[in-house]
Image: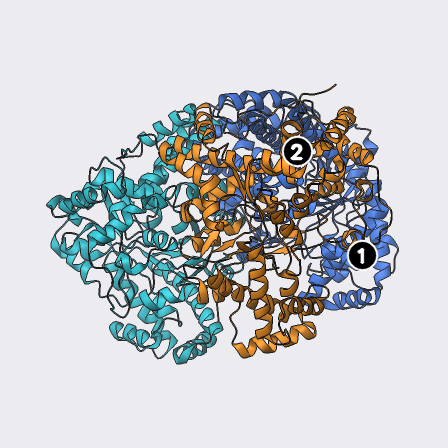
Chain colours: A cyan, B orange, C blue
Amino acid sequence: MTRPLVLYPDRLFPADPGTRAIARALYEGVKDLPIVSPHGHTDPAWFAYDAPFTDPASLLIVPDHYVFRMLYSQGVALESLGVPSVDGSLVEQDPRKIWAIFAQRYHLFRGTPSRMWLDWVFAEVFGLDVLLDESTADHYYEVIDAALKTEAFRPRALFERFGIEAIATTEGPLDPLVHHRAIRESGWSGRVVTAYRPDPVVDPETPGFAAKVAKFGEMAGEDVSTYAGYLAAHRFHRARFREAGATSTDHGHPSARTADLSPEDCEALYRRVLAGASKEDAELFRAQILTEMAGMSVEDGMVMQLHPAVYRSHNQAVLDRFGRDKGGDIPLPGEFVQALKPLLDRHGNDPRLTLILFTLDEDVYSRELAPLAGHYPSLRLGPPWWFHDSPEGMRRFRERTTETAGFYNTVGFNDDTRAFLSIPARHDVARRMDCAWLAQLVAEHRLPEDEAHEVARALAYDLVKAAYKL
Amino acid sequence: MTRPLVLYPDRLFPADPGTRAIARALYEGVKDLPIVSPHGHTDPAWFAYDAPFTDPASLLIVPDHYVFRMLYSQGVALESLGVPSVDGSLVEQDPRKIWAIFAQRYHLFRGTPSRMWLDWVFAEVFGLDVLLDESTADHYYEVIDAALKTEAFRPRALFERFGIEAIATTEGPLDPLVHHRAIRESGWSGRVVTAYRPDPVVDPETPGFAAKVAKFGEMAGEDVSTYAGYLAAHRFHRARFREAGATSTDHGHPSARTADLSPEDCEALYRRVLAGASKEDAELFRAQILTEMAGMSVEDGMVMQLHPAVYRSHNQAVLDRFGRDKGGDIPLPGEFVQALKPLLDRHGNDPRLTLILFTLDEDVYSRELAPLAGHYPSLRLGPPWWFHDSPEGMRRFRERTTETAGFYNTVGFNDDTRAFLSIPARHDVARRMDCAWLAQLVAEHRLPEDEAHEVARALAYDLVKAAYKL
Amino acid sequence: MTRPLVLYPDRLFPADPGTRAIARALYEGVKDLPIVSPHGHTDPAWFAYDAPFTDPASLLIVPDHYVFRMLYSQGVALESLGVPSVDGSLVEQDPRKIWAIFAQRYHLFRGTPSRMWLDWVFAEVFGLDVLLDESTADHYYEVIDAALKTEAFRPRALFERFGIEAIATTEGPLDPLVHHRAIRESGWSGRVVTAYRPDPVVDPETPGFAAKVAKFGEMAGEDVSTYAGYLAAHRFHRARFREAGATSTDHGHPSARTADLSPEDCEALYRRVLAGASKEDAELFRAQILTEMAGMSVEDGMVMQLHPAVYRSHNQAVLDRFGRDKGGDIPLPGEFVQALKPLLDRHGNDPRLTLILFTLDEDVYSRELAPLAGHYPSLRLGPPWWFHDSPEGMRRFRERTTETAGFYNTVGFNDDTRAFLSIPARHDVARRMDCAWLAQLVAEHRLPEDEAHEVARALAYDLVKAAYKL
């Protein structure tokens, strides 16, 4: 028996009719604002060459670790979902079979944001009006597959249809940025910028670190045998990224630790990590480089983002067989107060610095992040991240940060995704949840309604443009 | 002036009328499902011999640490509540006096789940219709005492009246399980199974550890002077428990730490802990045994439960005078990501293992537990535990775990109690709170109502039976 | 365009009409109860000499770190707000200019409790009926400035108008308490008491610690070269403070750590810290003194308050230029279970001790504080503190502590403020939020309405008087 697929206009709004009416009015004022996506992981090649997406499974399942981690947690082998193996051994190649496995288990996603994003994609992007399940799997596959073969579903057409004003991708420091150049040279009007994520040449625990640093120096024409040369190479690459539109850097570290060592200690530490770092030296080097990056941001105006405290690739067997980013990343406790002190002592009061902080440890919202951002002029709070990029996660973020940090020390929404088709759905969830929160404040007479309208617009559009200089 | 005691049909449902109506409809579909109680601390002797409960105080106050901890916190001496002393020195023996102290202070329980469970017991089990307070204390005592003397209030009659399909007790590894045998041999149809809780022979810090291990080996006919013999004894006792119906093991450790040492290191560690363990060796031994237990679960199919991170018997004076389990246990911070890695590296991807995790540190729900259970096929989330087995605790559990782990990586409800009469009340609270949460999802258009009905049934009945193989 | 300033009678009550009606009824019963303010930082000189407040900026902005920290976080220099510099270098002196900067940026406070408190002060105390912004800045300044010049806005008149039954200030151990004496000797009927906050002679990391201890001994007539003499000096000063009305002590430590050393170890430790303490010795000394203070509270009946785990003056540049208490204090993780054990082992079961615990780490509410206070007869939970003294903070406090600790292990509200004019607003927020929480319990049939009325009164008035012996 087929069930209908319906996107209710009032979804995510509070159930109380009075509050809901306020939320609806607030949302009316922001729902059609352009999307500014300042941090994410879409592939610039899509926009550079505008090739069609190949099939439903390769587009919506194989690359989406939110989707396959849930299926894996319920006993579905990653091989059967077509997730490529490291050694090239055979995994499922038939997208219809992959799709069928997913469709059969779509109930596993009940209550998750993936369900909400996917339903939006199915209904809004592909016009489907029945719910996905075993009985509708083939119908879904055919409708989506047929659509993907049309011009209207090419990356650029979708970009325009989605109302994206600007989107940032994220590239490593050795990336030649050819796709971004191709986009610019194509004459297409879509704004796709990069972001500088130097982790591979900052984290001595990266496999092949020394070789990567050597390449990094070579590309920059700098002698990276010295720390000074290494820093100069960063300046070169930051400038190179800015030419490809970058307005921000991004740093994904195991902790938020920062350091501010003497030049001599930096030089000695750098030599040690190039030779093969101890765990403590690796941590100290990453810590020192965060402070250096903040200093360079003061110089060049690039906004700095810090995404700390994730245990990457916790599942050793999955890492060995399928590589990184396969759903096995698990959050760690956050600590910012001691960790950021050296960086903040050096640059925290400088109005030219914007350092945007993210966390996966929600206890930190009210204990550390809101108090820090509510005081230091350089600090801003990034939106709820990753596992918390969800209705409840967004609710907790506002409930726990607003009273101490206010709205204006936050920076709007990041979709942070490689799932391109879900981008409007994610921004829509954020806008709805912000309006829901504001509606509660209005209904409880904690904020006048006219001011709530101004805040709603700021959260949906103004703050992100200002913070990221987009 | 006597106040009425009323159990409102809509209790615990959201106040918003629309949402409440949805919750009511969902609850209607699950309220009469049988109770499956996969983890708890009832006394199997009750069901084996079906002796009447002696009096109201001995049944409802003296053994209930939720009740006497609150009274103690407000200055009531445990002696006056009849809590037995370790040295046998006199404590209050008159159950009427104990009852009077409790009744006078019943207002202290306002807003607590104890109040809700007790009111349910008073109204539903005993048919009382006035509120307990000083003025009604005698009436209560007489009504309850009279009821307990009747056939209808014997343990087996209540078991049947409560609609219990299956209940698990928890026994130590040296328990001869005679009561469970007596239940089976009695021909009574009630399903009462045991669970294997080997802590006394796993935790070297248990008083008399070496002697207990010796007894453990003797009962098994194994030479426990070697680690191999010690593991063989576990296999023997696990099989013995399975014969008494056990489908699960349970582990109450000071932390979730696991280890995966070489056989030589295990042997050496085992010898050291038998001789008298250092604190670090004790922790390491417990850690290693968790991994061994997981391995044996892979072999024999027993579901593994981990209840970590409680400071047991924090109040030294109470421990000295009254012994363990007297309300002085206090939660500790949880840490699972680093702690479980050795066990998960060894067995975490094995579909034959089910490891159910519990926590008393709620920050861990969204940061660690939901991400872990939403990825590893072996992991499931136990329901909110102990201090969090309450309406707000249940609400937080669903709010913080659903979006990352979904519903199907959870395992329904555990009452975890020795308060037999409160078991239906506790399951009823869980069913109501789950329906309340689902109703909110439906009202906010985050889940279609027909799917919510399926989930409600899964949470109340299907998931617990599947996870615990009951 | 001027916007109206309206204080809605139903503010902070839940939006659901049924629940709101219950909240309104509960609030009706407590809104006019006298204010008991057992812990705060008002200046006793105000009440001693009843001098008029000088101007709007000096009253409402310059001393309020909630206000200037938010402005500073958005790039406003503290100099321009008239915050005095340590070296006496010039800062803004014109209160009109300070006021204008604040007024222009009043939107930054949207969603914060400062906004709610200030709006209350503007509307209720000064009768303003338009919203503060750039266009109304001058009007505000003139209205407030004119009012402050009248008799009705002197400290004592406001004290009486606010319905304050008793208020506690907080003084250091070297304070001569002359203002409190002046109040008593003036014949004025207002009850203003002090509280004993010995941190400067307890924390060896205080600048000039040894000299302060010497002064402390000299004032007491005790030989503080020995630990015994040092303790005797505490007894002297505690008695001196009690004469100035004190019923409580207060302790602001970097952690909740306590210790219970042997007399010899205390003596040796004391000698070491007088000579210049190591970090670890300083921590151990503070820990030991907390246990000593608990012992003295057993003797003299003073209620003990512990406010732990804040990183004071995190912003080094602000500390250097403007000194302490300038908005740069940031919370740290809380830990009470291990930390309090030595003190509780010694005094935790003594009914003569009341130790009131505060935290800025909200995860600790349900994990540690509620379980501890729900067991130990000496422990009580202070209200949500500082950054959490807000509607959402209060909601979380009740949601996370009530079910384990109940209502009667909490102690009502503390305003903890130096912002005198906001005191009624803060108590009003607490009363409203408690009524909102109780209304939810009533609406969800978790507490009968008549009992909720009793609890509302206890939370607003009875519990604070009892706990603080006021």
Quadrant for residue A194, please give it.
bottom left
Q: Say which element carries label 1.
A: helix
Q: Which residue is mark 2?
A: B118
Residue under mark 1: which chain is it in? C
Reply above or below: C430 against B303: above
Name the one closer to the observer, C368 or C429.
C368
Q: Is residue C207 left or right of residue A438?
A: right
Residue B82's x, y, as percent? 80, 42
Do labels 2 and 1 touch, CB within 8 Å? no
Q: Residue C131: where, in percent of width, then height?
A: 47, 27
Residue where numbered disc 1 is placed: C215
Please identify the quadrant where the N terminus of chain A is shown: top left
The count of marks equals: 2
Query: Quick one: C391 or B78, which is closer to the camera?
Result: B78
Judge whether C70 appears above or below B133 on screen: below
Give, as a three-letter code, the residue at label 2: Leu
Q: CA distance from mark 2 to mark 1?
A: 58 Å
The answer to whether residue C364 is above or below residue A1 is below
Q: Is residue C466 visible?
A: yes
The subunit carrying tag 2 is B
Q: Residues within 10 Å of mark 2 (few under 14, many from 20)?
A: some
Q: SS class of the residue under badge 2?
A: helix
Q: In x, y percent, where is residue A148?
A: 15, 47
Q: Amino acid at mark 1?
A: Lys
